[in-house]
Image: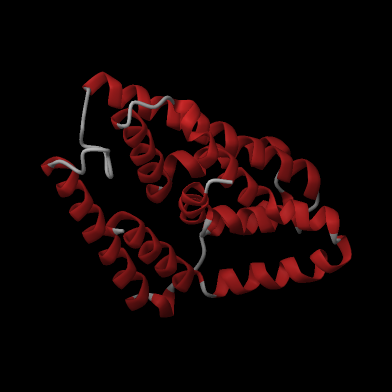
Amino acid sequence: MDTGALVLAIPMMAGPQVLSSIIFVTGRRPVRTSVAYVVAIAAAIAVGLGASTQLAHLFNTQAAIGGSGGPTKLGTTIQLVMVGVLIFLAVRSYLTRATSKPPKWLAKLQSASPKEALLLGVLLIFLMPTDVVIVLTTGFHLESEGKSVVDGLPLVAATTLLAALPLILYLLFRRRATVLMPRVRNWMSTNSWLVNIIIYLLFVALILF
């Protein structure tokens, strides 16, 4: 699998995205809801990549980050703004760590239906700022390199794999997974502020390097 795609997939699935995957396998319908969620993640990223590539083509932009000719002035400005916003969010997560709590809707996922899991997967990709930025950046990069959306499939595959990882572990090691997954879920819920900081700083590194 493309290493670059896997690196991008990590911040896409970190946080509520992977926590949702873990909660689904500890819920009432572990397999059905997890499969629906993974399918939604894959479909949403594929559609998002197609739309961002078409948008880049429409505007005939060369502002994509890391294009073959190097970033333009606009591309550099976008990079700096993104880095500034992400650093601000990381600092805010640290300062508010004492009162930080996971979203309330996460507590309802254990009883979610497959349809609800399907909807959640789509919404998380299209509404989470980090996911939107990664999908847009990838689409614009593909356009600047003269590539098609097919070349973005490694990102779809890597993200889908990470989304499906809790389900795969559940199917392979059901007894151990039923013990381990709740512990991971509880740790991530308790330390959501730390997870957020790691995501923001990882994405800053991806932008700068």
> Which residue is situated farthest in the left direction here?
73
Q: Is residue 59 above or below residue 184?
A: above
Seen at 32% across and 61% down, the residue is: 204
Task: Give the quadrant of residue 144.
Answer: top left
Q: Position of residue 157 (x, y in %)?
A: 59, 40
How many numbered badges does the structure rendering display?
0
Tell me where residue 178 appears, x and y as whole percent. 81, 65
Residue at image coords 68%, 58%: 22
Residue at image location 27% in from the left, 58% down from the top: 208
Residue plotted at (63% across, 59% down): 107
Q: Is residue 121 visible?
A: yes
Q: Nearer the viewer, residue 71 or 97?
A: 71
Instruction: Answer left or right for 200 relative to 190.
Output: left
* Residue closer to the observer: 57 or 131: 57
Farthest residue, direction bottom: 98
Q: Is residue 137 left or right of residue 85?
A: right
Residue 35 in percent (x, y) is at 73, 40
Q: Quadrant of residue 121?
A: top right
Q: Is residue 67 left or right of residue 157?
A: left
Provide residue 27's location: percent of width, then percent of height. 76, 55
